[in-house]
Image: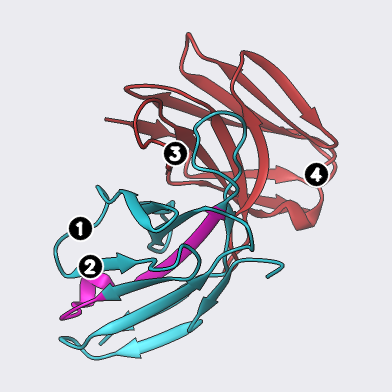
Chain colours: A red, B cyan
């Protein structure tokens, strides 16, 4: 089975940096994804990690440690529009396992 | 199309009725996924198609739920004898391939909000 844990809510200040953690336990692993979802909208892809280390993409970076079953999403220079839910998702390995299993999401509130 | 299109965007029905939700994936995407999302939760996997066949239907909660993709493009999620607990946003996503190598990013539609009274 698969289990994904992330904090339910976080609050941060405009212009600051915030780190959203995700831990996972899976029967197989073939990649970790971060999605952003604004209220009432579809999830949109942010980042993908399959090897250990940091992937940087503009203001957003994502880190993976496979041995620890741990990832984080780092958001820099926070803007009000970054207020959203951030979803961590894991893809398994073997067979018809192209599906992503999502965590419950972390609701980030950016305050002025 | 340019994105994943889902219809209807909103559906209100009565307990016991039958509903169909439609998904039109991105042109050329061979893989199609159905998820459902309740308020405050992450998307919950239902079923995954590779082409016309259901490669993984392990997430369908019971036999009232069924999905088809007869021509390998548009998919329909069918729910029989709806119950109040079926109320949720049903999300469809598609991706380029069915292999589990590479990013193979899922692109989601805006969802169909189902309310069962």
The reply to whether callout 2 and callout 4 are in contact (CB within 8 Å) is: no
Q: Which element carries disc 2, helix, strand or loop?
A: strand
Q: Give the range drawn in magenta.
A: B79-94
What residue appears at the point 31 percent right and 66 percent down from the top-left corner? Answer: B67
Residue highlighted by disc 4: A78
Q: Is residue B46 visible?
A: no
Q: Position of residue B7 (x, y in %)?
A: 50, 81
A111 on left or right of B104: right
Image quarter in which the N terminus of chain A is found: top left
Residue A112: name its quadrant.
Answer: bottom right
Q: Where is residue B49 in the image (x, y as percent from the top left)?
A: 40, 53
Mark 1 and mark 3: Cα distance apart in space: 19 Å
Mark 2 and mark 4: Cα distance apart in space: 41 Å
Q: Is residue B89 above or below residue A87?
A: below
The reply to whether callout 1 and callout 4 are in contact (CB within 8 Å) is: no
Q: Provide the chain ID for the residue under circle 1.
A: B
Q: Do labels 3 and 4 share a chain?
A: yes
Q: Which element carries disc 4, helix, strand or loop?
A: loop
């Amino acid at each position: 089975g698969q289990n994904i844990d992330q904090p339910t809510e976080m609050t941060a200040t405009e212009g600051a940096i915030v780190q959203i953690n995700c831990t996972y336990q899976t029967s197989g692993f073939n990649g970790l994804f971060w999605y952003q979802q604004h209220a009432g909208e579809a999830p949109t892809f942010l980042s993908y990690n399959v090897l250990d280390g940091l992937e940087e993409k503009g203001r957003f970076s994502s880190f993976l440690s496979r041995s620890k079953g741990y990832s984080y999403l780092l958001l820099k220079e926070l803007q009000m529009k970054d207020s959203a839910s951030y979803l961590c998702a894991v893809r398994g390995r073997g067979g018809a396992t192209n599906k992503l299993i999502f965590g419950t999401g972390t609701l980030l509130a950016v305050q002025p | 199309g340019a994105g994943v299109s889902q219809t209807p965007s909103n559906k209100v029905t009565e307990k016991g009725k039958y509903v169909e939700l439609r998904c039109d994936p991105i042109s050329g995407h061979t893989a199609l996924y159905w998820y459902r999302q309740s308020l405050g939760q992450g998307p919950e996997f239902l079923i995954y198609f590779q082409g016309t066949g259901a490669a993984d239907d392990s997430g369908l909660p019971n036999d009232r739920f069924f999905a088809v993709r007869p021509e390998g493009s548009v998919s329909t999620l069918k729910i029989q004898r709806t119950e109040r607990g079926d109320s949720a946003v049903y999300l469809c996503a598609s991706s380029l391939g069915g292999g589990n190598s590479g990013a193979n990013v899922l692109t989601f539609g805006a969802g169909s909000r189902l309310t069962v009274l």
